[in-house]
Image (tube, grey):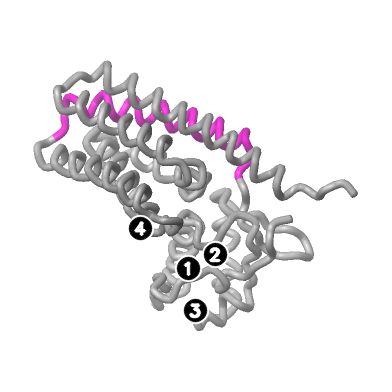
Amino acid sequence: MMAEVTATDSTPAHASTPRRTDDHDLVDSLVTVLQERINAGEIPAGSWLRQEALAKEFGVSRMPVREALRELQARGSVELIANRGARVRLPSTRDIIEVYELHGVLQGHAGQAAAELITSEQLGRLSAAEALFRQAVEDLRASDGDTTTAQRRWHEANTEFHAVIIEAGGNKHLAEVYENLHHKVPRNLTWIALGNDVRRLEKDAAEHAGILEAIGRGDAAATRTLLTEHVKRASDLLVRTVDEIGQDSSPRRR
């Protein structure tokens, strides 16, 4: 079974905390902080989010915490269970397939546009992110069991790389939809699927290098194809990973 933990059990000392303004801003700030922790895996899937513990940690009443948890439920990040409380959702395989199907469409469309519209400044940022992928591979190879540096660098690279493509595509409404999809599947699940296998991480880095090269030469059709295939492979890998997690957390027969 998944461990029952509170948010504070897995929250590092340096983690961000919500800003104090009016009630609406406070709720939004709580949502942002908790969402960031969930996405990063600092609060893992299956963790219980206790209102009393969160209120104490953030120095607020339980009311804004309750509202923040409701907003996270609406986003699909948290499930509210009657008489038990709030728990971080492990996305189902169907969730992943459907979310990543949309990811593929959005990334492919944005990438096609980006290959024609990207600025030199954006291309420089994309190139820097691609270099971070290669560095993450070297970090993992030299990790000796501690993958913290490799994980942090890979998350930084992945977030920046795909954000630049969405930005360069120039469609602000597409960008808003894409951002909302990120709340459906915590990004640390992708690292769980990739992070313990250097060959998988090398393949992932090579795929990003190919996308960068296609965008750099202005090949819109190739960029769209490469991004769509990249997202489909990520989806397949995540489905297998979530299936394995689900099997590990299922009650064993005696």
Dot 1 corresponds to which residue? 30
The residue nearer to you, when weighing 41 against 35, is 41
Residue at mark 4 to residue at mark 1: CA–CA distance? 27 Å
Asked whether the viewer can see residue 247, the reply is yes
- Residue 149 is tagged as 4
Residue at mark 3 to residue at mark 1: CA–CA distance? 9 Å
Vertical comparison of 46 with 103: above or below: below
The residue nearer to you, when weighing 55 against 238, is 238
What range of the chain is rendered magenta?
91-118
Label 2 with label 4: CB-CB less than 8 Å? no
SS under mark 1 = helix
Q: Which-is-in-front pick, marks 3 and 4?
A: 4
- Rendered image quadrant of residue 227: top left
Name which residue type carries label 2.
Ala
Residue at mark 3 to residue at mark 4: CA–CA distance? 28 Å
Q: Residue 110 in magenta?
A: yes
Dot 3 corresponds to which residue? 58
The first of marks 4 and 1 along the sequence is 1
Q: Residue 8 at x, y = what percent?
A: 55, 73
The residue nearer to you, when weighing 29 against 196, is 196
Residue at 82% x, 48% y: name it: 252
- Residue 68 is tagged as 2
